[in-house]
């Protein structure tokens, strides 16, 4: 939703008239900031907080219902390096649960440790994604799960070789049968099993969620002020909306480089040139470095980037990208809020792999 749309909706929630919203917004944010300094959220912020109530049930396609056996099989496959041509890379090599389900590197590493062209995206809360990867090239988890395996640059294992390799491991057969009775070991079933496990990778409640639920002590005053800025002056919520803090859209935010992103998937559409998916901000403090090219090392650097309105001016640049005029204290408050999106997720158990 546009900024104007957010303000109109907020006015409706507060009983105000839509034509007055633009004129009132600065005053309303000032009131919000003053009250937040006492760690007491204003009614305005509480109305905004309602937009961020998290969903508790992940969407699951009817053709691949979630069962414990399917999740268990997918977990084994996810951590198994035999799904790569070299036998050295697993899905978890790049999507490490200890690193926010990515790899902590500016650019990912693929076959023979060759550097890839983009930063590894997290797969946290990926069950809700409708278009996957930075450029949205895949439309389902089942499809996406197979992409890196077959990719020459990434895991480099042809899919027919994948099936032959798994069939040659006796210990896998009973797990496939328990998960997908009568379907055998096939490319399609591997994709479905991996997708089943990935749908369980969901962030736990963060301090922000507890604050949204009414616990006024869950976030300190700086984080509350940061939430007001996030939805106001800093304009973050234009793209990072909803409980996952992403609208799933694709934007050119003004990063340097020639990567066309979504524009290479759907050419000829001006606004999709150099456009990349707005990532979730859940557990963002654990996932440095940032951006699709890994070019920003810290959250502070990311905020500075947006504050100056990006680094490149071109026809595809999103109209939401503009200088913000943030003060140093405001930037600190934004960082405090982003840290409040970090959840205390339970450790992930690496499974015993079949032999």
Image (cartoon, rainbow, N blue to C red):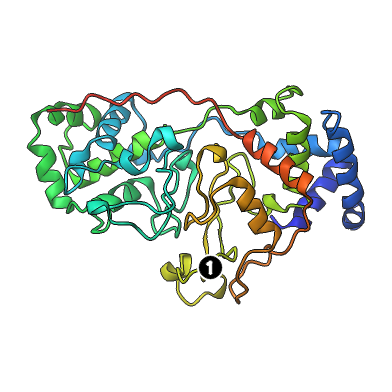
| Residue 240 in view in this figure | no
Label total for image: 1
Image quadrant holding the N terminus, namely bottom right
Q: Is residue 157 above or below residue 340?
A: below
Q: Position of residue 170 (x, y in %)?
A: 8, 30
Q: Residue at x 61, y 33 (%)?
A: 54
Image quadrant holding the C terminus, namely top left
Q: Position of residue 331 (x, y in %)?
A: 73, 47
Q: Position of residue 202 (x, y in %)?
A: 48, 33
Q: Residue at x 88, y 51 (%)?
A: 26
Q: Which image quadrant is residue 336 in?
A: top right
Viewer-closest of 61 and 112: 112
Q: Is residue 236 left or right of residue 252?
A: right
User: Helix, strand, or loop for circle 1?
Assistant: loop
Q: Is residue 73 left or right of residue 135?
A: left
Q: Residues within 10 Å of mark 1 (few under 14, many from 20)?
A: few
| Residue 330 in view in this figure | yes
Q: Which residue is mark 1?
A: 256
Q: Is residue 202 above or below residue 279?
A: above
Q: Residue at x 58, y 48 (%)?
A: 246
Q: Which image quadrant is residue 46 in?
A: top right
Q: Position of residue 200 (x, y in %)?
A: 42, 32
């Amino acid at each position: 939703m546009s900024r104007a749309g957010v303000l109109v909706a907020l006015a409706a929630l507060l009983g105000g008239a839509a034509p007055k919203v633009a004129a009132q917004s600065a005053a309303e944010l000032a009131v919000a900031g003053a009250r937040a300094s006492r760690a007491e959220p204003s009614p305005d912020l509480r109305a905004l907080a309602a937009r961020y109530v998290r969903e508790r049930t992940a969407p699951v396609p009817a053709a691949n219902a979630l069962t414990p056996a399917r999740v268990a099989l997918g977990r084994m496959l996810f951590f198994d390096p035999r799904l790569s041509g070299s036998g050295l890379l697993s899905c978890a090599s790049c999507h490490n649960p200890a690193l926010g389900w990515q790899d902590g590197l500016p650019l990912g590493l693929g076959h023979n440790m060759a550097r890839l062209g983009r930063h590894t995206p997290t797969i946290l809360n990926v069950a809700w994604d409708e278009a996957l990867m930075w450029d949205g090239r895949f439309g389902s988890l089942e499809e996406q799960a197979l992409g890196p395996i077959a990719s020459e640059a990434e895991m480099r294992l042809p899919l027919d070789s994948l099936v032959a390799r798994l069939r040659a491991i006796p210990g896998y057969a009973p797990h496939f049968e328990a998960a997908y009775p009568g379907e055998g070991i096939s490319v399609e079933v591997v994709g479905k099993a991996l997708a089943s496990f990935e749908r369980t990778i969901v962030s736990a409640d963060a301090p922000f969620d507890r604050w949204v639920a009414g616990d006024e002590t869950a976030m300190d005053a700086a984080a509350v002020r940061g939430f007001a800025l996030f939805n106001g002056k800093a304009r973050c919520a234009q793209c990072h909306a909803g409980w996952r803090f992403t609208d799933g859209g694709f934007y050119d935010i003004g990063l340097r480089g020639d990567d066309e992103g979504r524009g290479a998937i759907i050419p000829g559409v001006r606004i999709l040139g150099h456009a990349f998916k707005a990532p979730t901000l859940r557990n963002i403090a654990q996932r440095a470095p940032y951006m699709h090219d890994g070019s920003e090392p810290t959250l502070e650097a990311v905020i500075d980037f947006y504050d100056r309105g990006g680094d490149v001016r071109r026809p595809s640049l999103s109209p939401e990208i503009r200088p913000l005029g943030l003060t140093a204290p405001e930037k600190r408050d934004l960082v405090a809020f982003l840290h409040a999106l970090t959840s205390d997720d339970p450790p992930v158990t690496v499974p015993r792999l079949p032999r």
